[in-house]
Image (cartoon, rainbow, N blue to C red):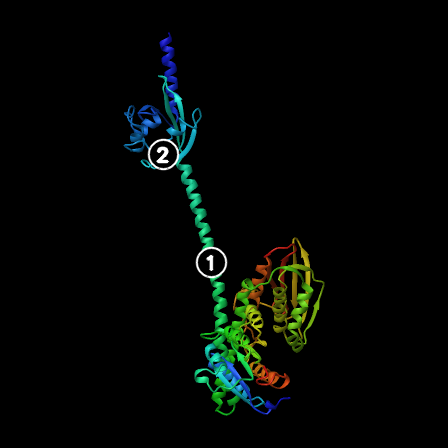
Amino acid sequence: MPDVSIRSEFETLKAIVDGIDDVIYIADPDTYELLHANEALRGTWGSDIIGKKCHKVLQDRNQPCPFCTNNKIFGKYLGRSYVWEFQNKVNGNWYRCSDKAIRWVDGRMVRFELAADITEAKMAEQALKDSREELESTLKRLRQSNEDLQQFAYVASHDLQEPLRMVSSFTQLIAERYQGKLDEKADRWIHFAVDGANRMQALIQDLLSFSRVNTHGAGFGPVELAQAASGAMANLTMAVEEAGAKISVEDLPVVHGDAGQLTLVFQNLIGNAVKFCRDEPPRIRISAEQKAGEWVVCVRDNGIGIDAAYMKKIFIIFQRLHTREEYPGTGLGLAVCKRILQRHKGRIWVESEMGRGSGFYFSLPDAPGGEP
Amino acid sequence: MKDNDILPAKILLVEDNPGDAELAREALNNSKFMNELFVVDDGEKALDFLNRRGRYEDAPRPDIILLDLNLPKKDGREVLAEIKADDRLKTIPVVVLTTSKADEDIAKSYRLHANCYITKPLDLKQFFQVVRNIKEFWMSIVVLPRDGDT
């Protein structure tokens, strides 16, 4: 029975087409009338849509859509599918559409569209893009604020120097000319003023050098650490001699870095070792050891040592553990060291026991690293 | 040695900070050489002084000029350029005395024919010493052309 078999084939195809989640429709390219729509489309847009204009039903437009792809599929894309994505303004969903000109049952050429709902994927993609953009803009703002801060520290400390030079110069001049000519109180007050101005000058100098680590660093090149260490000792000659310090330097490697800054690291570490000594003369040993991918340099002393509770704190800017009467200083030396080593992609840490001396360690990558 | 060794050296200080001018005055008062210090506080006045214009009609020709770089109106760099472009003035030694340690300021000053460039020391004693050294070097060690020998 041919009728039955034809009907059964029709039912089969209809079941398949209506079983697809994607939207399928057929429209006449001249009249824009919908000739066929599958269940997915009818379920969303209504069961009475056949015979109505596709632009009215699907896009709520009284005229053909300006983005209609008919000119493509009946032109350049004739015989193949034109695939595109768009967002339907009526329901807000995103679709990936495959449009094609096909021959209809009555022989005329018609518009065939299969459209998959890709809203979820689009939303996820958008969310990812948004969060990436947000991350990038946060990073940009962070970089900007970092630069601003550095600039601020530099300008503030630089411009503070001028008026301070006046305060310091004239208090010194008063001290020189009038010491002992006024009363005892005046002498003491002048002393406090001179001392305060001197300390502030030291602070500003150190703050300047701290802010210059990143902004005024020199380029990287091969640095003989032995030379950096001896340069540092030469700068400390007076203090070393005064304290009667004995310094031994073992074999040190050549590393990649900023020679001036690495000299400053040695100068701060050796200077500290000389300063924070016990009653006996300071003995300081500088050595280096090669570890996996890095050199670890050690400056070891026999000084007062550091309480375990403060071992991290000492690298913080302006952090001091002693009164100025006990040990002078601004509390910036180790913060400068830390910053210099950060610029070199290295680390700095301390191992110490109270009363038994300290070992300051810093690591430097043995292959060229850090800033170019 | 020149005749004017016995005359007080005439020093023109171009400095907008009155505190610095005062410090320079103190430093020179304590120096063993006699001197006359003239202070102007901006670049325009410096050029008026050197060219004896306006209120500086009777100004003397200084033996040496101490010039700050950062000045109101015409800054030290412009003053230096004008002095060194002027045949009558260019023989007067110009000592740039400034707080700037910037490489570009140093290079630019020498390119404009500054006779030397000195950074003001922060410390008072060092500042005094530097001012006296400048004066002793330029006034008693160096031989300069006679006034009008240009």
Whether pointer 1 and pointer 2 mark residues with C-beta atoms closer than 8 Å, the reply is: no
The one of A173 and A5 positioned closer to us in this rendering: A173
Earlier residue among tags 1 and 2: 2
Question: At x 39% / y 15%, what residue is drawn?
Answer: A9
Q: Which label number is shown at residue B110? A: none
At mark 2, the secondary structure is: loop
Q: CA distance from mark 1 to mark 2?
A: 43 Å
**Circle 2 residues within 10 Å: few <14, some 14–19, many ≥20:** few
Residue A109 appears in view: yes
Residue A60's x, y, as percent?
29, 33
Q: Quadrant of residue A31?
A: top left
- Residue A265, picture quadrant: bottom right
Q: Which residue is mark 1?
A: A144
The tally of labels here is 2
Q: Residues within 10 Å of mark 1 (few under 14, many from 20)?
A: few
- Residue nearest the viewer, comparing A17 with A80: A80
Residues indicated by labels 1 and 2 sit on the same polypeptide chain: yes
Where does the image place residue A89, in percent across and percent down from the top left?
33, 37
Camera sees residue A309: no
- Relative vertical location of residue B16 with respect to residue A26 in this rendering, above or below: below
Q: Quadrant of the C terminus of chain B?
A: bottom right
Residue B87: horizontal and vertical position, in percent? 55, 78
Q: Secondary structure at mark 1?
A: helix
Q: Position of residue A232 (x, y in %)?
A: 65, 69
Quarter of the image where the N terminus of chain B is located: bottom right
Amino acid type of disc 1? Gln
Chain containing the residue with disc 1 = A
Nearer-the-camera pick, A124 or B149: B149
- Residue matched to label 2: A67
Front of the two marks 1 and 2: 2
The single residue placed furthest to the top in the displayed view is A1
